Amino acid sequence: MTLVEIMMVMATLGMLGVLVMLSLLVLPAQPSVFTVREDLKSIASALEVYRLDNGTYPTTAQGLEALVKLPTRPPLPRFWDAQGYLASLPADPWGSAYQYEIPGTRSNLDYDLFSWGADGEAGGEGENADVGNWAE
């Protein structure tokens, strides 16, 4: 092996080391975001079935709880599934409740469904960013 070849191997190993370090520093937020997206898909599916059964989505006041327990606030659902639409409401990866607002202002659907992120507050960047059913 020549000196040039050895230097090329060293440079390649150095770049791989940098990539590994970056992935260890940057990627920890990704599993949490993935979990949020999967939870939102499940909740959105339950909301769709609720809408098909009742002609409308739950109101903001009824909230996502309407997918688990029969709402007591009007408008009362016409054909609420006695088993509920979800067995229980999942918490986001940071232990907070998912947020639901109808009408929505950020998504192209009738409602916004989201997590406030790790900080539990609106806005933010990285792991503190809001993750919702809207395009990023």
Image: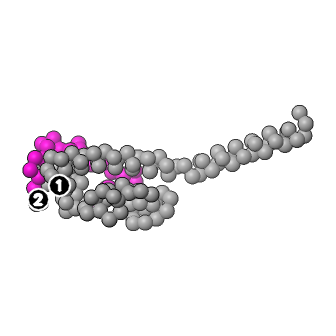
The reply to whether residue 68 is in sight is no
Which secondary structure class fits the magenta region best? loop
Please say whether residue 8 is one of the residues in the magenta stretch: no
Q: Position of residue 105 (x, y in %)?
A: 32, 65
Dots 1 and 2: beta carbons under 8 Å? yes
Q: Which mark is residue 75?
A: 2
**SS at mark 2?**
loop
Task: Identify the element where label 1 is drawn.
Answer: loop
Q: Name the residue at 15% across, 41% down.
A: 83
Report the front residue among 45 and 91: 45
Badge 1 is on which residue?
56
Q: Earlier in the sequence, mark 1 or mark 2?
A: 1
Give the residue drawn at x 37%, y 45%.
Answer: 38
Residue span colored magenta: 75-101
Residue at 24% x, 48% y is 48
Q: Is residue 104 visible?
A: yes
Left or right of 72? Residue 30 is right
Looking at the rendering, in which quadrant would you find the C terminus? Answer: bottom left
Q: Is residue 32 left or right of residue 18?
A: left
In the displayed structure image, the side of residue 6 where residue 18 appears, left or right: left
Where is residue 113 shown, x and y percent of the image?
Answer: 32, 56
Q: Nearer the viewer, residue 26 or 8?
A: 8
Quarter of the figure with residue 59? bottom left
Q: What's the residue type where badge 1 is placed? A: Thr
Measuring from the top left, give residue 57's x and y in whole percent.
20, 55
Q: Which mark is residue 93?
A: none
Q: Amino acid type of disc 2?
A: Pro
